[in-house]
Image (cartoon, rainbow, N blue to C red):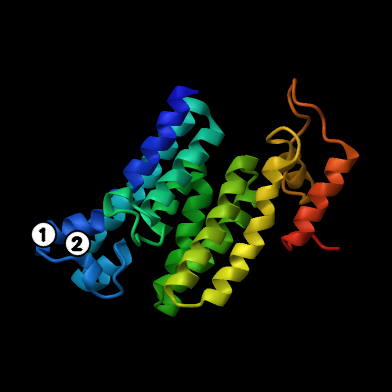
C-alpha cells in the first residue's frame, strides 16, 4: 500500500517538472510562458523554437507519463499504473513547481501513460495523430481526434477495463483543458457535466463494483464476479449504474 501511494505521489511530482520551461530557460534564456500561446508543452516549444528544442521537450513530456505508469504496473498492477499515470498528467497540467499555475495540455504525457498501459493501442493512436496533423495541420485537432479514438481502440483490442476507464477519462480531460485554453468555456462546462455523473460509479457498493457493472452494461468487457469479501452487485445497484450511464449520455434510454 505504501509503495503504491509513493508511486502515485512520485508520478505527480515527476509530471510537474516543466521541461518546456527548463529547456527554454537554459538553452534560449527565455520564458516559454511569454512566447506563442504561453503553454509550457512541446507544441508551443516546437512552434516557437523549432524541432531542435521541441523534440527533446516532447520526448521528456512523454517519458514523465510513461515512467510512473510503468513503475505503477510493476508495483501494484493495472490500477496503480493508471493512477500513477493520471497523477503525472495532473502534474503536467497543474505543476507544483510552478505554484499550480497553467501547465501543459497533457497530450504528450497522456500518450506516455497510454504506451505504458496499452502499447499497441497507443501506437495505433499515434498513427491517427500523425495522419490528422498532416491533413489538418492543427496539433490541437489531432490531439482531440486521438483522445476520442483511444477508448475505442482500447475496447476493440480488449484491453483491461482499468485501462479503458483511463482512456475515457483522459480523453474527456484533454477535451476540457483544450476548450478552456481556447476560451470555449461553454464546451468545457458541457464536458465537465458529462464527466461528473461518472464519478458516482466509484461510490456504488464496494469499489470497484460500480465500475465493473458499468463496463458490463456498456458491453466493453465481461468483468466477471467480484472477489470476496466484496459482494455481488444487487438489482438496485444495477439500476443505479444504468441511471448514471444514461445521465452521462453513455447509454441509450
Residue 88 against residue 133 in the figure, above or below:
above
Residue 249 circle label = none
Q: Nearer the viewer, residue 186 or 17?
A: 186
Q: How far across and how far down the image is residue 166, in percent? A: 56, 48
Residue drawn at 77 percent across, 33 percent down? 224
**Left or right: where 183 falls relative to 13:** right
**Label of residue 27 in the image:** 1
Identify the element where label 2 is drawn. helix
Q: Is residue 144 visible?
A: yes
Q: Is tag 2's residue or tag 1's residue first in the polypeptide sequence?
A: 1
Do callouts 2 and 1 mark residues in contact (Cβ within 8 Å)? yes
Quote the CA–CA distance across marks 2 and 1: 9 Å
Q: Pick the residue in front: 148 or 136.
A: 148
Residue occupying image coordinates x 90% and y 40%: 235
Percent coordinates x, y for residue 33 in the rendering: 25, 67
Q: Quick check: can you spot residue 132? A: no
For disc 2, the marked residue is 53
Disc 1 secondary structure class = helix
Question: Is 60 left, or right, of 5 in this rendering?
Answer: left
Q: Quadrant of residue 72?
A: top left
In the picture, the quarter occupied by the C terminus is bottom right
Is the residue marked by circle 2 packed among few (<14), some (14-19), or many (20+) residues within 10 Å? some
x, y percentage for residue 152? 63, 56
Q: Position of residue 126 (x, y in %)?
A: 45, 58
Amino acid at each position: 500500500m505504501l509503495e503504491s501511494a509513493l508511486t502515485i505521489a512520485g508520478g505527480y511530482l515527476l509530471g510537474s517538472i516543466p521541461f518546456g520551461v527548463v529547456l527554454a530557460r537554459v538553452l534560449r534564456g527565455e520564458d516559454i510562458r511569454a512566447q506563442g500561446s504561453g503553454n509550457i508543452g512541446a507544441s508551443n516549444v516546437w512552434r516557437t523554437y523549432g524541432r531542435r528544442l521541441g523534440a527533446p521537450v516532447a520526448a521528456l513530456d512523454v517519458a514523465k507519463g510513461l515512467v510512473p505508469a510503468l513503475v505503477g504496473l510493476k508495483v501494484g498492477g493495472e490500477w496503480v499504473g493508471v493512477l500513477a499515470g493520471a497523477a503525472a498528467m495532473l502534474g503536467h497540467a497543474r505543476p507544483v513547481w510552478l505554484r499550480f499555475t497553467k501547465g501543459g495540455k497533457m497530450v504528450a504525457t497522456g500518450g506516455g501513460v497510454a504506451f505504458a498501459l496499452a502499447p499497441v493501442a497507443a501506437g495505433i493512436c499515434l498513427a491517427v495523430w500523425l495522419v490528422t496533423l498532416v491533413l489538418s495541420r492543427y496539433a490541437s485537432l489531432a490531439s482531440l481526434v486521438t483522445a476520442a479514438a483511444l477508448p475505442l481502440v482500447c475496447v476493440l483490442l480488449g484491453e483491461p477495463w482499468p485501462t479503458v476507464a483511463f482512456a475515457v477519462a483522459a480523453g474527456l480531460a484533454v477535451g476540457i483543458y483544450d476548450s478552456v485554453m481556447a476560451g470555449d468555456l461553454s464546451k468545457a462546462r458541457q464536458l465537465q457535466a458529462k464527466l461528473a455523473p461518472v464519478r458516482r460509479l466509484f461510490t456504488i457498493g464496494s469499489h470497484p463494483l460500480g465500475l465493473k457493472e458499468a463496463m458490463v452494461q456498456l458491453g466493453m468487457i465481461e468483468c466477471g464476479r467480484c472477489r470476496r469479501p466484496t459482494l455481488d452487485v444487487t438489482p438496485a445497484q444495477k439500476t443505479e449504474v444504468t441511471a448514471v450511464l444514461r445521465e452521462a449520455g453513455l447509454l441509450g434510454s
